[in-house]
């Protein structure tokens, strides 16, 4: 198959548009610019556009120096004007895919970008959706949207789905060395997309359709959600039975095949695990099927903040204290350790429940300077021995590696560690409570 686009990809003269400059889009835009392509970052948030153009980084997985370098070399520039799509030979869509309040997919951003594409793209353009979504989205929204304006997939336009699998804060796997799945609407679409990603990403796995790639990505997240729910449920049982769940998991993990450890926590967070499984659950209903594992896992994981609060009440009871009026020092509020992303963090839910119970809340999180809960603004405190001594319980919700767990245990009268962050501390830990 011959298309001038192949030549442009191989000699790096193809111009790339990355739509959505968030946790997924900005690292991808920087990677493509580093690879030598001219990249236009397009985002409706003017503030992000301005920051990118000033070379100011706001995503921890992006290296400040690399962003500055590609901006200085004019390989990357950002805009909120979708007219920039006219310049692009390749468009990578990295917009958010949230849920409605009723947990139904909200794909309005993908629809909006498709409408802009229909107005602006020129023939011989590759369009790839990277956002996580239900199987069928690329076909139903992007392919049908572009067909309606007379573009034929595999001939005038190449359309593919290639899910972003980035794990924020992962020091080993970044955008360039995380293996990539690609599915095309037609075989030529797949071929162009595969050739493009081979220029910058270490290993590409082509699959037979966009639906397979979409399903594989959402299945990866369902797999995590279900396994986390399983270990959370086991932890609830261990708590009742007086068994340490972490010791159980470590013991099971000694099996040298067939077991993969997952760990319990105060709930699941981030843009992926709490949301993506519901995309599949919603789609499955169109096929008269109820994906019960997904719903059940969601139910168990969403119950964990309630379990944390009720166990905290039990812990305070051991000192004849009640939660109402107790000073609770929350340690860590982001959804996972060592990153600044607060989205869907279970800490927010736990803190709201504690507020409702009348607890006096303070928190420390070097990644989150301020936090607003139900209209009350909190400021992160410096984690000092005196702060720890002043609280009735230190509640670890995110085990950042910068926390000094020795100091926490030595100074707080009670520590409720929902992440097993204190495991590294040797010696007596009589004041430390785990989930079980
Ligand atoms: N964050 C992750 O860890 C992760 C990992 C893998 C996949 N994903 C998926 O990637 C997608 C993007 O996630 P993210 O974490 O980068 O989101 P994000 O919220 O960090 O970034 C999305 C960006 O898109 C912009 N935007 C929103 N609507 C737009 C529109 N109509 N046109 C142009 N720009 C628009 C927003 O201003 C924002 O800057 C989601 O589908 C998500 O599920 C996320």
Image (spheres, rainbow, N blue to C red):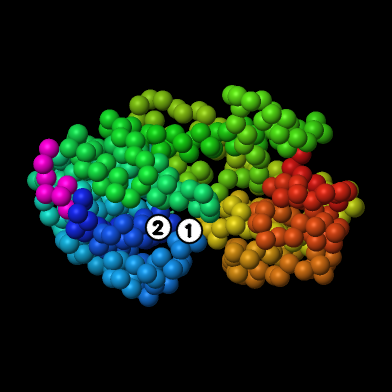
Q: Residue 27 shows which numbered tag?
A: 2
Q: Is residue 31 left or right of residue 430?
A: left
Q: Is residue 141 left or right of residue 388?
A: left
Q: Quadrant of residue 71?
A: bottom left
Q: Residue 93 shows which numbered tag?
A: none
Task: Please say whether residue 426 is visible from this viewpoint.
Answer: yes
Q: Quadrant of residue 268?
A: top right
**Residue at the image point whose x is 63% and y is 66% from the top:** 366
Q: Which residue is mark 1?
A: 61
Q: In the image, residue 161 lies at what x, y percent?
A: 30, 42
| Rendering quadrant holding ligand 1 | bottom left
Number of dots carrying numbers: 2
Q: Is residue 160 left or right of residue 380?
A: left
Q: In the image, residue 90 lies at what x, y percent?
A: 22, 53
Disc 1 C-beta below 8 A from ligand 1: no
Q: From the viewer's perspective, is residue 59 above or below residue 179?
A: below
**Are there few (<14), some (14-19), or many (20+) residues within 10 Å of tag 1?**
many
Q: In the image, residue 224 lies at what x, y percent?
A: 53, 37
Of labels 1 and 2, earlier in sequence is 2
Kindly check if marks 1 and 2 are in contact, taking CB atoms under 8 A apart as contact.
yes
* Residue nearer the viewer, 213 or 32: 32
**Prevailing secondary structure class for the magenta stretch in the rendered image:** helix
**Residue at the image point whose x is 44% and y is 34% from the top:** 219
């Amino acid at each position: 198959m011959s298309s001038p686009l192949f030549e442009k990809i191989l000699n790096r003269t193809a111009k790339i548009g990355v739509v959505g400059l968030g946790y997924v889009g900005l690292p991808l835009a920087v990677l493509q610019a580093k690879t030598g392509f001219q990249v236009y970052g397009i985002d409706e948030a003017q503030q992000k556009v301005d920051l990118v153009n000033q070379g100011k980084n706001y995503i921890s997985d992006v290296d400040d120096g690399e962003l500055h370098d590609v901006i200085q070399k004019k390989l990357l520039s950002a805009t909120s004007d979708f007219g920039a799509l006219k310049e692009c030979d390749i468009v990578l869509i990295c917009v958010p895919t949230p849920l409605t309040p009723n947990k139904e997919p909200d794909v309005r951003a993908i629809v909006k970008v498709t409408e802009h594409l229909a107005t602006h793209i020129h023939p011989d353009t590759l369009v790839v959706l990277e956002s996580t979504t239900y199987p069928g989205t690329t076909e139903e929204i992007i392919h049908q949207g572009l067909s309606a304006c007379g573009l034929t997939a595999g001939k005038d336009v190449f359309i593919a789905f290639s899910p972003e699998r980035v794990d924020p804060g992962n020091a080993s796997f970044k955008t360039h060395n995380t293996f990539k799945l690609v599915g095309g609407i037609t075989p030529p679409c797949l071929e162009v997309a595969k050739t493009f990603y081979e220029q910058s990403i270490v290993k590409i796995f082509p699959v037979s359709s966009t639906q397979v790639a979409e399903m594989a990505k959402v299945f990866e997240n369902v797999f995590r959600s279900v396994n986390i729910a399983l270990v959370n449920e086991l932890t609830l049982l261990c708590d009742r039975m007086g068994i340490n769940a972490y010791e159980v998991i470590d013991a099971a993990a000694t099996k040298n095949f067939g077991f993969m450890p997952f760990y319990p926590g105060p709930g699941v967070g981030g843009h992926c695990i709490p949301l993506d499984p519901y995309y599949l659950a919603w789609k499955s209903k169109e096929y008269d099927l109820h994906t019960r594992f997904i719903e059940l896992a969601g139910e168990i994981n969403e119950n964990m903040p309630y379990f944390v609060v009720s166990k905290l009440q039990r812990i305070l009871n051991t000192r004849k204290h009640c939660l109402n009026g107790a000073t609770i020092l929350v340690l860590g509020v982001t959804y996972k350790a060592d990153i600044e992303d607060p989205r869907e963090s279970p800490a927010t839910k736990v803190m709201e429940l504690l507020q409702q119970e009348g607890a006096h809340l303070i928190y420390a999180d070097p990644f989150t300077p301020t936090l607003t809960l139900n209209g009350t603004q909190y400021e992160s405190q410096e984690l000092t021995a005196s702060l720890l001594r002043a609280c009735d319980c230190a509640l670890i919700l995110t085990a950042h590696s910068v926390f000094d767990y020795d100091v926490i245990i030595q100074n707080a009268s009670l520590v409720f560690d929902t992440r097993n962050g204190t495991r590294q501390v040797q010696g007596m830990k009589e004041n430390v409570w785990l989930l079980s």
